[in-house]
Amino acid sequence: MGRDVEVPETVVRRLPIYVRALAQLEAEGVKTISSLELGRYIGVTAAQIRKDLSYFGEFGKQGRGYEVSHLLGEIKRILGLTRVWPMVVVGAGRLGQAIASYDGFKPRGFEVVAVFDNDPRKVGQRVGHLVIQDVTELPETVRALNVKIGIVAVPAAEAQKVANLMVDAGIRAVLNYAPTALHVPEGIRVEDVDPVAILQSLTYYLVNAGDSDPVRAGAAAPAGDSTPEL
Amino acid sequence: MGRDVEVPETVVRRLPIYVRALAQLEAEGVKTISSLELGRYIGVTAAQIRKDLSYFGEFGKQGRGYEVSHLLGEIKRILGLTRVWPMVVVGAGRLGQAIASYDGFKPRGFEVVAVFDNDPRKVGQRVGHLVIQDVTELPETVRALNVKIGIVAVPAAEAQKVANLMVDAGIRAVLNYAPTALHVPEGIRVEDVDPVAILQSLTYYLVNAGDSDPVRAGAAAPAGDSTPEL
DNA sequence: GGATGTGAAAGTGTTCACAGCC
DNA sequence: GGCTGTGAACACTTTCACATCC
C-alpha cells in the first residue's frame, strides 16, 4: 500500500472527478466497476486510476474491481467531504449573486453562508435567503462561523484588497473569479476560475488545427453520429 | 529559435495568463518588463516564461527585457485573438443566461451570438439583446454564422446530447459547464468548468493542512499584513 | 551590465507490465 | 480468469546555468 509518499497535486485535482463519476454511477444503480470501465467513463487510463488510488490505500478487490458506493465514500472521506463547508462570497454584482444563489453547492458539500459588498446601495438587499452585508463585517462573520473558504467575485482592480482582507480574517482557501493574479502568504491556497482564459487557449487549437492534432484541416465538420466508443 | 518542436499543452494554457497580465501592465502604463518581473507579477518563474515563449520565437531584447505591448500583440496573434470569436450557448437557465449576458467576453475576444433551449416557455424570451431560440435551430445558426465554439450550460443528464448536436453542427471546441464527462470525437476539444470540483480539491488541503504545506497546524490564522513580497 | 534564449539536468507525472490475490 | 496494486520504465515539464547579444 502506498502511504507516506507525498500525494501529487495533480492526483488531488482528479479525485473530485472520480467523485462526480462515482456519484453518477451510483445513481444509475451500478454496484461494481473496474478501473478500466471507470477510466473509459471519465476519459483517463485505468492505470492512472489505480495509481491515483494507491496513494491513499487499497479500495478494490482483485478479480472484481471496486464497489461503487464504498469507493465513493472513501474518496469523499479523503477529500474531507463528509461535512458541509461554509463559504463567504465577496462581491454582490451579477456574478456574486449568481454564485450566492447557486443551488449546486449543497449537494456536493458546500454552502454560501454570507455575501458582502462595499456598495451601500447593495448592502441590506437580499440575494436568495441571504442579506448582503457590508464588507467591513467580513472578519467578524468569518470568525464567528469559522469559515475557511472565500470566493472573490469583485472586479480585478479590487481583488487583491479583498484577498488580503479574507486572509487576515482567517480564510485559508480562495476561489478567485477575478481575472487577475492574487498574491497570498505561504500556506493559503488560491484557485482561479477564468473561463475566458480557457477559451483563449482553445482558440490556439482552432487556429492551428492539424499541427498538434491529427485533424483533417479545412472543410467543414463531418455530419453523422458524434459519440465515439462507449 | 525554437520552432517545429511540438508545443506542450501546458504552455498553451499559460499563454492566456500572460495575455491577462500584459494587458493589465499595459493599462498601468508599463512599457517594458523583464521575465523576472513578469514572473513575480503572475507567480511563475522567469525561466518558465522564457522557455514558454521560446516555443514560438524570440520576442525580447537582451539586456532590456520585453516591450509590453509588442509581446502582448505577439501572444494574442499566436492564440488567434486578433479577431472576435462567435460562440453559441445551449441552456437558458440561470447559468446560461448569466453566460449569455456576461459582458467580460467582448473585451477579451469572444461574443455570444445565440442562445438555445428546448423549453418552449423559454424560447422567444430575451436575454440581453438575444432571443432564445429552439435548440433544433442550432445546426442552421452554427453553420450560417460559422461558429466553432459551443458552451454547454444544461443539466448533466442532457449534456452529452447537446455535445453531440454541437459536434454534428460543426462546433470544434466545447466549454462544458455541466458537471459530467463529455465524450467527443478525436480532434474536438472539450474543457470543463467545474468550480465545485475545484473547491473539492481545496478541502483536501484544508483537512490535511501541515502534511504537504509548511503550515502551522491548529490555532486561527495570524492577523497582520497578508501580502507577501512584491 | 543585464537580460534573453536554450541545451542539459533535475524533477514530476504517466504508462507499462506483471506478481499477487480474489 | 480477471483485475488490483505497484515497482520500474518512460514521457513530460520545470529549473538550472551559461553562452550570446543588445
Image (cartoon, coloured by chain):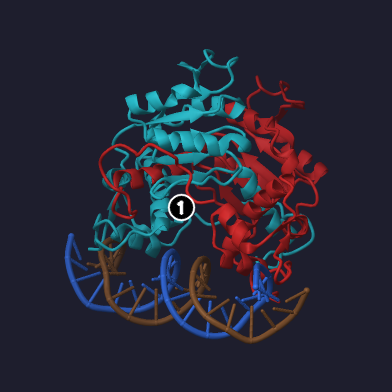
Chain colours: A cyan, B red, C blue, D brown
For residue B133, above or below residue B88: above
Q: Secondary structure at mark 1?
A: helix
Q: Which quarter of the picture shows residue D18?
A: bottom right
- x%, y% of residue B157? 50, 37
The reply, left or right, for residue A106 in relation to residue D2 is right
**Extreme residue in the right direction:** B144
- Give the tally of numbered discs: 1
The reply, left or right, for residue A15 in relation to residue A205 is left
For residue B58, above or below residue B10: below
- x%, y% of residue A193? 55, 43
Q: Amino acid at mark 1?
A: Ile
Q: Which residue lies under the disc numbered 1?
A: A42
- x%, y% of residue A169? 40, 32
- x%, y% of residue A63? 26, 62
For residue B131, above or below residue A54: above
Depth check: give the residue in front, D18 or A53.
D18
For residue A185, above or below residue B53: above
Q: Which quarter of the picture shows residue B54?
A: bottom right
Residue drawn at the location 60% of the way across and 14% of the way down: A121
